[in-house]
């Protein structure tokens, strides 16, 4: 019930190295089932194009989940995350091939708060495009 | 079509209790590709101080619309669901969601606004156990593309 990262050893500006996460069509199918979000734009190319999208796009929440995983793997305890918010600034387009798309997540400690909490600013990119903005997590450190 | 601003401030009846199961948490963790043992292994979760396996931070999205979801399909709101994408999402946690929790959601539409050609609607959902213990609060902002055009 506690993070492995120690508050006293963290400095503002400290960077958390990027991690790449792959998203393929099968991941979106699994995510649709697990989350209950069956919006066709996440699995039906014909429908996605009909409503003006370039192709099937990932659930925003799939991308947010990868950003969450990035934070919880860093903190060492998912229960250490006390606040987590994002804006979905661009789409993650997922082609119908075996490689899929890549979501690259990195972080920086933006602020040290009271009670051993820190604000981690997150960057998530697919190719050169930022797919999350205003992405931040407040984490309770040890 | 512009969304009906009369919906701002509306609070919806509490949902039926949602029972958090180990199986659903494991399914969700597998779907996001996260192998953290605290999502799967009761012993690991107990060793970390939790009563049972816990859920990933974004898991509450599974049940967060169980109260208030009917508002989004209410014809009076005027939402064209085919044009909806997810705009913003935020979770404030009191503690992680844990297997065995029975959770009740109470939703309020906190905001409807235009941004460029789009319409944005924010639904806040207060998540508590059936005993009344607060667990988390979720804020779900959806975007109706072209809705304000």
Image (cartoon, coloured by chain):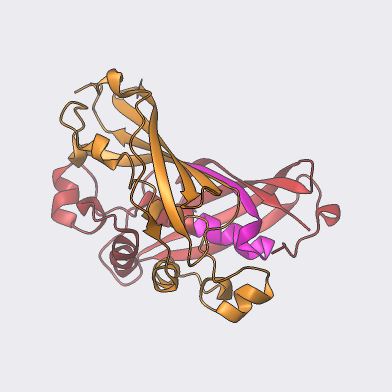
Chain colours: A red, B orange
Residue closest to the far top:
B6
Figure check: B18 above or below A52: below
- Measured as percent of width and height from the top left, residue A59 is found at 35, 53
Q: Can residue A142 be seen by looking at this rendering?
A: yes
| Quadrant, the N terminus of chain A | bottom right
- Measured as percent of width and height from the top left, residue A57 is found at 30, 52
| Quadrant, the C terminus of chain A | bottom right
| Residue B116 in which image quadrant | top left
In the displayed structure image, the side of residue B106 where residue A117 appears, left or right: right
Q: Can residue A88 be seen by looking at this rendering?
A: no
| Residue A35 in which image quadrant | bottom left
Please tell me which residue is depicted at 47% across the width and 46% down the height of the picture: B127
Residue closest to the far front:
B131
Residue closest to the far right:
A8
Figure check: A135 above or below A34: above
Q: Which residues are magenta?
A: A66-87
- Measured as percent of width and height from the top left, residue A42 is found at 26, 55
| Residue B146 in which image quadrant | top left
Number of numbered discs visible in the structure rendering: 0
Question: B15 or A77, which lies in front?
Answer: B15
Q: Examine the structure image and report whether residue A77 is included in the region drawn in magenta.
A: yes
Please tell me which residue is depicted at 26% across the width and 35% down the height of the picture: B71
Q: Examine the structure image and report whether residue A45 is included in the region drawn in magenta.
A: no
Please tell me which residue is depicted at 57% across the width and 57% down the height of the picture: B96
Question: A113 or A135, which lies in front?
Answer: A113
In the displayed structure image, the side of residue B36 where residue B77 appears, left or right: left
- Measured as percent of width and height from the top left, residue B57 is found at 52, 56
Question: B97 or A12, which lies in front?
Answer: B97
Please tell me which residue is depicted at 54% across the width and 66% down the height of the picture: B54
């Amino acid at each position: 019930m506690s993070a492995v990262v120690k508050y006293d050893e963290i400095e503002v500006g400290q960077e958390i190295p990027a991690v790449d996460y792959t998203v393929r069509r099968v991941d979106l199918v699994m995510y649709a089932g697990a989350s209950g979000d069956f919006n066709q734009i996440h699995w039906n190319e014909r429908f996605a194009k009909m409503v003006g999208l370039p192709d099937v796009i990932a659930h925003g929440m799939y991308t947010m989940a990868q950003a969450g995983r990035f934070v919880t793997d860093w903190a060492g305890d998912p229960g250490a995350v006390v606040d987590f918010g994002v804006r979905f600034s661009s789409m993650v387009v997922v082609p119908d091939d075996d490689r899929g798309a890549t979501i690259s997540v990195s972080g920086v400690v933006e602020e040290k708060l009271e009670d051993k909490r820190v604000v981690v600013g997150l960057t998530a990119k697919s190719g050169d495009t930022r797919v999350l903005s205003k992405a931040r997590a407040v984490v309770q450190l040890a | 079509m512009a969304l009906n601003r009369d919906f701002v401030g509306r609070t919806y009846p509490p949902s039926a209790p949602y029972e958090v199961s180990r199986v659903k948490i494991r399914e969700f963790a597998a779907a996001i590709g996260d192998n953290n043992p605290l999502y799967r292994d009761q012993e690991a979760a107990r060793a970390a101080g939790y009563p049972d396996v816990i859920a990933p931070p974004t898991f509450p999205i599974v049940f967060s619309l169980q109260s208030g979801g009917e508002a989004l399909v209410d014809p009076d709101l005027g939402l064209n669901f085919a044009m909806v994408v997810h705009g913003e999402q935020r979770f404030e946690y009191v503690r992680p969601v844990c297997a065995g929790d029975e959770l009740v959601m109470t939703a309020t539409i906190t905001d409807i606004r235009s941004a460029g050609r789009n319409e944005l609607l924010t639904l806040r959902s207060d998540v508590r156990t059936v005993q009344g213990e607060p667990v988390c609060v979720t804020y779900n902002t959806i975007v109706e593309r072209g809705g304000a055009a």
